[in-house]
Every structure is written in structure tokens, then in C-alpha cells.
Amino acid sequence: MTVYLNALGLVCALGRGQAAVAEALFAGTGSSLRAVHDSIPGRSLLVGAVQDPLPELPTSWGHNVTRNNRLLLAAALDIAEPVQQAILRFGAARIGVVLGTSTSGIAEASQGIAQFLHQGQLPADYSYRQQELVAPARFLSEWFDLAGPSYAISTACTSSARALLSARRLLEQGLCDAVLCGGVDSLCNLTLNGFAALEAVASERCNPFSRNRQGINIGEAAALFLLTREPTPGRRPIALLGAGASSDAHHISAPDPQGLGAQAAMRAALADAGLGPEQIDYLNLHGTATLHNDSMESLAVQAVFPHPLPCSSSKPMTGHTLGAAGALEAAFCWLSLNDSLGRVPPHLWDGQSDPLCAPLDLVETGRRLPAARHLMSNSFAFGGSNVSLILGVPADPEVAHG
């Protein structure tokens, strides 16, 4: 079954909304990250923080008042009209919500626990429900008054890519007629300190596939799609053509060195889409700028795609948005497929290739792929969780739907 990504709301360090994000993304904006000095003692870090004003939530929403939910609401408001149209057409009970997250409302929960440790009592507005992983999905269902299946997926950095795959299954199984799916994660000290303890964060802008790479920058974002069985009339149909998932379980925080799990996910996505490797026009790399990820991903891409494939990592512009990364980078593919000039996200780095990485055709700023129809996005996570998604324009939407 072909399913269509008919609406997109997003917010990240590049801006809020399709137009603002696309302008900064395709221009190769390298100044979107900002320094924070108070998260890790003795260190200054660059992070992909959202600078745009976020919608406020009334205090009556209680435990739902978190930065994570405000990011999610910013994305949701961008597509409120098509969501309301779907409610009128299908009914609230036929619309599901599937979101990926890894932080949920842990920032606010951590502040409450810190007060307890220093003052002996929790804040009056403290609620454990803020940090439940299902909190953003529950909030979004309540905001739109939906009654369909609603749940969250938390598989680290593949969370929201898996959310799109899971949403497609709800449509295929006839459990829903439309699904709000994507991901959201917000910056918090717990995450920053955790990755710093793993010696995985860089003090400078991340530098994927460079011999000088030092690690990741953490970011925050929300990306939300409305997934249905039919394309929106009058708009270019963008479909989720294929998805592949694997679990290599090589190590809790390191991938299989040869990228065997990554290869399996990419090949499964190609098979699911009925496409050959030569039919993929661009690949959004996971590209974290960590030593092990970049090495294994380059080897995996070379193994699956023997021909030069234009590719890039967008994380130097957004930071690694963790549970939101899979949906955000799928959104970048969606923007590219809708771009009349055929632009794709450029790869920002110092140009110093690592001899331990297989060579890749990294996209320079200004490069265009006007004939591109099939784009892939990779997401890899701790524990060996791997997901590859293929977005594209069906050859014949009417035939594909039928």
C-alpha cells in the first residue's frame, strides 16, 4: 500500500515552518548552532536550540506544560487546518498519533527533582506524568481531541523514523484512516551531560566524515506529518515508498564496525519500495560526526550503493535532535522533493577526508538534483537499532493508490 505524507509542520534550529527551514537548509546555514556555557561544568558546547518563539500553553493544561510539548505544538499548529479537515472527513476515532521521543518532559521533571534535593520538597506543579515517554502523544491527542490509537516509540535516535513506519502499519491494517506521526525532543541538561560522559560531544560545530571530527552537537526539534492513504489534490504527491528496520545488537552504544545492520536496513527499504540502488537519487546520512558511526555508515553506503550517490549529513545545521532526528531528516527529504529548483541539503564540513571512511559523494552548497524522485534517509541508534526510509514521488499516484 502506498501512503502519502500530505502535510508537514516542523521547527528546529534552522527556524519554524516549511519556508523558513527550507531557505536556511538549502543555503547551508552554518550559524544556526549557539553556545551554552552552564550545562556542563567547565565546558562550552554548541547546541541546536530553537530560537523562534514557541506557543504558550495555558496553566490549565497542568502537567502538559513542558518545552517538549510547546515544540510539538509549534509543529502541530502549522498543519492544524489539514488535521481538522481529516477529523471532519474520517472522525476523531479514525485518526491516530504515533510519535518518537527520547526526552519527553524530562527537563521540567529534572528541575522538580533538583528542588526536592535542595529544599526537601517537590514543586507544587510537579507531575511524574511530564516525563513519561507517552506524554507528547497523549498531549497531541488531547489537543486535537482525537480518539484513535495514540502511543510513543522510544528507540533512541531511530524513534521518530520508527514512528513513521508504525504509522504506515496502522493504515495498512485498517486501524486508522489518518495518522499524525513524527517526533519531538527538547534540549535538557540530562541529555547533554549523558553524551558528554560518553565523550561523544564536540565543543565546535560537528564535522561529519572528517578526519578531524570530534563528536556530535545536540539539538532539539519537532517534525510532524499527516499520513493518509490518498494524496492531497492539487499538490505534488510525496509518498513513504519504503522502510527498512534492523537490529544488529552489536554493542549498547557502538554500531557494528562494518555497518551490517545499517546495510540490512537500507536493503530492506529498497526491497520494500521495489527499487534498485541505482534508483535512489540522494541519501540523507545519519552522519553524527562520531568516530564509529561515520566509519561504519560510509562502509555500509559503499556496500549498498556501488555507484556514487549524492549524500549529506544535515546535523551540522540542526544538531543531532535524537528522538526527533528521523522525522526531521525525512522532513528535509520532503522539502527537497517539493523544491522546484531540485535543491538538497548540503554537507558542511572542513573537507578533510578520513582515510578510515569509505569515500562518499558529499553534496556541496548550491548543488541541485532537479530530476530526483527517490530520496533515502538513514537513522541509527544505540543498541544497534537501524531504520532507513525512502520518500518519493510515485510514478503513477492513481495506480499506486489503487
Image: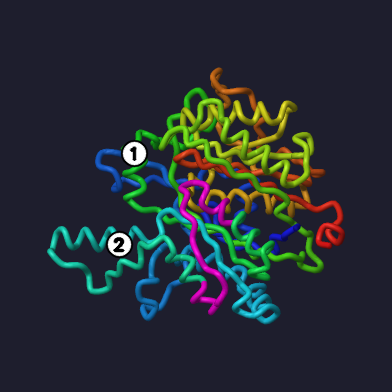
Stretch in magenta: 141-163
Q: Quadrant of the N terminus?
A: bottom right
Vertical order, 189 against 122 (above or below): above
Which residue is drawn at the image coordinates 68% and 70% (left, top)?
177
Q: Is residue 158 magenta?
A: yes
| Residue reaching furthest to the front | 173
Q: Are marks 1 and 2 in contact (CB under 8 Å)?
A: no
- Give the CA separation, mark 1 to mark 2: 20 Å
Question: Few, some or many C-alpha atoms within 10 Å of disc 1 (few <14, some 14-19, many ≥20)?
Answer: some
Q: Sequence order check: which comes first, mark 1 or mark 2?
A: 2
Residue 27 appears in view: no
Residue 251 image point, x, y percent = 43, 33
| Residue reaching furthest to the top | 355
Vertical order, 270 against 80 (above or below): above
The numbered mark at residue 109 is 2
The amino acid type, in three-letter code, at marker 2 is: Ala
The amino acid type, in three-letter code, at marker 1 is: Ala
Question: Few, some or many C-alpha atoms within 10 Å of disc 2 (few <14, some 14-19, many ≥20)?
Answer: many
The numbered mark at residue 196 is 1
